[in-house]
């Protein structure tokens, strides 16, 4: 669905990319799969595509979101840290017209959503000198509660920036953070390097967590919560 967003939300792109999405999913299916299993897979892909289309349309993305703000990457210096230390990431959808950042989740569960991810995007917007304050996870595959939204303040982002700065200093001093392993690891390129503490941890180092607590939390929001502004 990112290809659709990057195109400017043209409906014909949805129809054009559906076969490619199906082929990508089909490549993961064992060769011994039955015809019925393949048909069921195509129906699942098609269903997911049209659910996402419906959610995006209801959120008024075609009218609001500039394609250049889809998968918007950033690499920004952080005040107080050396210039070669950057805050790096990519926002799935930066809805400038609503001052809201959206992160897309392809899962059918809310359990892996971490509000700190959204706060990092908020910090990036602040460092860019752009409006910020609200962000949300989107779950196109969920019929109920397809939105997890948060609001954050300057105080929240100050806490995040302090924690990230402390962590960066520890790493520069030769310390490595303890990993939080999970199903998300298979998507990470970093864990394929010797620098990932999940796969490479010299001298049995254990990092003490001195980070400050965060006051924000995700709420199972409704689409109307975002459309309300």
Image: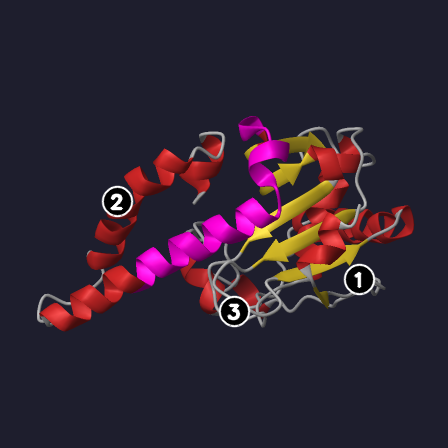
The residue positioned farthest toward the right in the image shown: 155
Place of residue 92 in the rendered image (x, y in percent of width and height, measured from the top left): 56, 43
Q: Is residue 37 above or below residue 19?
A: below
* Screen quadrant of the N terminus: top left
Q: CA distance from mark 1 to mark 2?
A: 43 Å
Q: Are marks 1 and 2 in contact (CB under 8 Å)?
A: no
Q: Residue at x 23, y 61 (%)?
A: 28
Residue 61, image x, y percentages? 59, 39
Q: Which numbered disc, 2 or 3, marks the residue that appears first in the sequence?
A: 2
Counting from the top left corner in percent of width and height, residue 103 is at 59, 50
Q: Quadrant of residue 111?
A: bottom right
Q: Give the side of residue 214 with respect to residue 120, left or right.
A: right
User: Does residue 132 appear left or right of residue 68 in this picture?
Assistant: right
- Look at the numbered disc 2 and give the secondary structure of its residue: helix
Observer-side mark, 1 or 2, equals 2
Helix, strand or loop at label 1? It is loop
Magenta range is 44-68
Q: Write down the quadrant of residue 175 in the picture.
A: bottom right
Q: Which residue is mark 3?
A: 181
- Residue 56 is covered by the magenta coloring: yes
Q: Is residue 50 rendered magenta in the image?
A: yes
The label number, if any, that marks residue 20 in the structure image: 2
Give x and y (percent) for residue 4.
43, 38
Q: Which residue is mark 1?
A: 211
Quadrant holding the C terminus = top right
Q: Residues within 10 Å of mark 2 (few under 14, many from 20)?
A: few
Q: Circles 3 and 1: CB distance less than 8 Å?
A: no
Label 3's element?
Answer: loop
């Amino acid at each position: 669905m990112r290809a659709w967003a990057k195109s400017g939300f043209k409906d014909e792109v949805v129809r054009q990319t559906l076969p490619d999405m199906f082929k990508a999913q089909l490549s993961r299916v064992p060769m011994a799969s039955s015809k019925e299993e393949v048909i069921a897979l195509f129906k699942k892909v098609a269903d997911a595509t049209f659910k996402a289309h419906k959610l995006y349309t209801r959120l008024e993305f075609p009218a609001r979101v500039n394609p250049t703000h889809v998968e918007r990457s950033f690499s920004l210096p952080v005040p107080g840290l050396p210039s070669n230390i950057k805050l790096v990431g990519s926002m799935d959808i930066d809805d400038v017209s609503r001052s809201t950042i959206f992160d897309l989740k392809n899962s059918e569960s809310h359990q892996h959503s971490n509000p700190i991810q959204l706060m990092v995007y908020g910090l990036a917007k602040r460092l860019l000198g752009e409006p910020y304050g609200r962000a949300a996870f989107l779950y196109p595959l969920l019929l109920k509660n397809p939105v997890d939204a948060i609001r954050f303040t300057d105080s929240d982002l100050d806490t995040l920036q302090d924690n990230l700065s402390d962590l960066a200093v520890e790493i520069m001093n030769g310390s490595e953070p303890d990993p939080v392993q999970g199903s998300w690891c298979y998507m990470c390129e970093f864990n394929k390097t010797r620098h990932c503490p999940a796969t490479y941890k010299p001298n049995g180092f254990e990092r003490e967590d001195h980070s400050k607590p965060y006051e924000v939390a995700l709420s199972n929001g409704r689409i109307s919560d975002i459309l309300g502004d």
